[in-house]
Amino acid sequence: MRANEFIFENTNQAAVDALMKKHGWSMGRTANGDFAFTWQGSKYEFFGERVRITLPDGKSLSVVWDKKPDWQGRGNDELSFAQAVQNKYLTFDLPIWQALDRGRLTDSQAIQKFKAENERQAREAVAQGATEDLTEVVDLDTAFPLKWDQQFAAQGEIHAGASDSDGREIGISFTPAGNGEVTDVAFTRGGTHEMTGRGDAGRVMATVINAINTYTKKYKPPYLAFSAKSSGGRASAYTAMIRRYAQGYELLSADQYPAALNNYIEFIGTDQPFVLART
């Protein structure tokens, strides 16, 4: 396995910009044409079986693949992959490097993990950037009063509603999917999925989050799922905001999706879901 086989170049410019803002991440090529990127103050240069790391304090070292764990190269600046993991020099995606070092993952499995983590980090960074446009702070005490509709409760479907300051209807629906273990969450304002650009965005999101917290406290669904189809293409932004304030749920990466989500993913088609799991 060569070091540069673990490289994944992200061509999504929105993701690149968001990761740069959140983690100080950038990527490019060295004068010799080797791939390089920065992450949280460290620079990584990949060439052949080596990764050259320049740490934030200026210290530079070379990590060499396919060497025995106790291997020591020239001087004190060359070390084995195992030593780099043990000393946490590979700060990005460290748990995956550790699992690879301990033999819990094969090279091909690790590559799939890195791909999934790359996608998760990009999605999360984009979502975080989008929520800053949505609203920096949501005060749950400013939520509009909710009214609950149990008309379809026998089928597991619950609805909540409220009116904003201009009288526009805010609708929040909770629909069972994925053999009942997954709850699809959708919300509208004035008949559309767009929550922003119409005033009171913070109060509207506070209302949605209060509805979610009330629902999850009572029904305790294992998974909450949001899709672009059910949130006007802004599922990532809304999911990040809800994740920040919702109680007892955490965001899953695609490689963490359980089998229960298969039916849900079939239900939404090609839509990319964002899934929260109960902790």
Image (cartoon, helix red, strand yellow):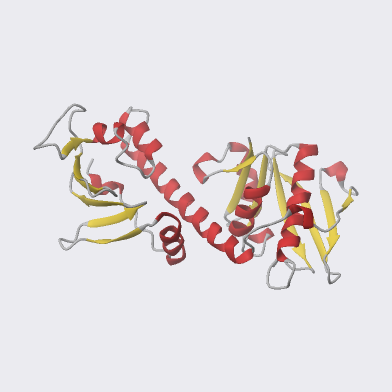
Residue nearest the observer in this picture, 116 or 249: 249
The residue positioned 84% from the left and 72% from the top of the image is 166
Q: Is residue 55 visible?
A: yes
Residue nearest the observer in this picture, 34 or 204: 204
Question: Looking at the picture, how far across and down is residue 123, in whole percent?
Answer: 51, 55
Left or right: 276, with 94 as reference point: right
Q: Quadrant of the N terminus?
A: top left
Q: Residue furthest left?
A: 74
Residue nearest the observer in this picture, 223 or 97: 97
Q: Is residue 109 visible?
A: no
The residue positioned 18% from the left and 61% from the top of the image is 33
Q: Quadrant of residue 191?
A: bottom right
Q: Quadrant of residue 71?
A: top left
Question: Looking at the picture, how far across and down is residue 112, in whole percent?
Answer: 40, 43
Left or right: 74, with 38 as reference point: left
Residue 185 vs 203, above or below: the answer is: above
Give the tally of numbered discs: 0
The residue positioned 39% from the left and 42% from the top of the image is 93
Residue nearest the observer in this picture, 83 or 56: 56
Q: Residue furthest right?
A: 151
Question: Looking at the picture, how far across and down is residue 158, in whole percent?
Answer: 83, 48
Q: Residue furthest front?
A: 57
Q: Quadrant of the C terminus?
A: top right
The residue positioned 62% from the left and 49% from the top of the image is 244
Q: Quadrant of residue 276?
A: top right
Question: Looking at the picture, how far across and down is residue 88, in whole percent?
Answer: 32, 37
